[in-house]
Every structure is written in structure tokens, then in C-alpha cells.
Image (cartoon, grey):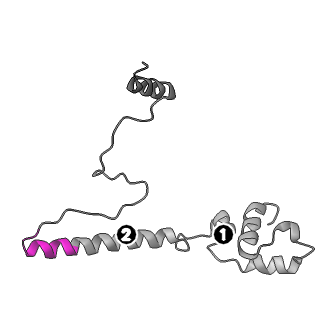
């Protein structure tokens, strides 16, 4: 187990106890390490590496649910406002990796350094 998953076990040990595999046999007994590994939860690096993590043990799933609830509550708010004759804009909670179409973007990408130097020189009257 340790030979095949040393990185994950070491990470879990370090982040949860402050020990590393280097401490086994000294400050940390082999029996303590065995107990630690047997009682690791599905939120551990070892569980993720072994494919035993379900996705519910991270905050990502919770964050997705909360963002969906925000969107639902905002839609209810929008519908109630519409009943009173007040229009509101569609406003979804931003999610990572999803582009916000309402944000204006300028330019096409990064400007090469030499072009930037030339542009500065032109503005200073040295071009």
C-alpha cells in the first residue's frame, strides 16, 4: 500500500497529523500508521487515488448546489418583481470555468513586449 501510494499517504499524514512517512518507526509507530490508513475517510488523498472518493466529500459539490439555489431564489425574486410590473435582469451566480457573456472584453490577447515598448515610446514622443 505504502509503496504504491506513498505520495497520497504522505500528504494525508502531513496535512492531518504533521507527521510524514519519514517519521514511521521513530516518532510514529507502524501500528499508528496502520490505524491512520484504515480510518481515513473518503475525503482523503488516498481515497481519491484509490477511486473511493464519491465527490460529496469535497466542497465543490456543495458549492454547485449553493450556486443552483442562488439561481433558483433569484428566479423566484425576478418572477415576483415581474408580477408587480418591475423588470429585473437575469443574474446567475458566476461559476468557475463558465464565461460571463455580460462582461466586456477589450483586445485580442497579450501584447508582445516589444510592441508595448514601441507604443510607450510613441506616446512619449520618442517614436
- Badge 2 marks a residue whose secondary structure is helix
- Badge 1 marks a residue whose secondary structure is helix
Residue at screen point 33% across, 53% down: 100
* Rendered-image quadrant of the N terminus: bottom right
On whether residue 80 falls in the magenta region, the answer is yes
- Where residue 20 sits in the image (x, y, percent)? 81, 68
- Where residue 68 sits in the image (x, y, percent)? 35, 70
Q: Which mark is residue 67?
A: 2
Residue at screen point 75% across, 69% down: 14
Q: Which residue is mark 1?
A: 47
Query: Which contiguous range is marked in magenta?
Result: 76-86
Relative to residue 88, is residue 123 drawn left or right? Answer: right
On whether residue 4 falls in the magenta region, the answer is no
Which badge, 2 or 1, comes first in the chain's sequence?
1
Q: Residue furthest right?
A: 26
State how many labels appear.
2
Residue 41 occupies which quadrant of the picture? bottom right
Pick whichever, 43 or 4, lies toward us.
43
Amino acid at each position: 500500500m505504502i509503496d504504491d501510494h506513498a505520495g497520497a499517504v504522505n500528504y494525508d499524514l502531513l496535512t492531518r497529523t504533521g507527521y510524514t512517512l519519514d517519521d514511521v518507526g521513530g516518532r510514529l509507530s507502524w501500528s499508528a500508521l496502520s490505524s491512520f490508513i484504515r480510518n481515513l475517510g473518503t475525503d482523503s488523498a488516498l481515497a481519491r487515488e484509490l477511486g473511493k472518493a464519491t465527490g460529496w466529500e469535497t466542497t465543490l459539490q456543495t458549492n454547485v448546489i449553493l450556486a443552483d439555489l442562488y439561481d433558483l431564489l433569484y428566479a423566484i425574486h425576478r418572477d415576483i418583481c415581474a408580477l408587480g410590473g418591475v423588470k429585473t435582469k437575469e443574474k446567475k451566480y458566476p461559476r468557475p470555468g463558465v464565461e460571463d457573456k455580460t462582461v466586456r472584453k477589450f483586445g485580442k490577447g497579450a501584447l508582445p513586449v516589444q510592441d508595448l515598448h514601441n507604443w510607450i515610446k510613441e506616446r512619449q514622443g520618442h517614436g
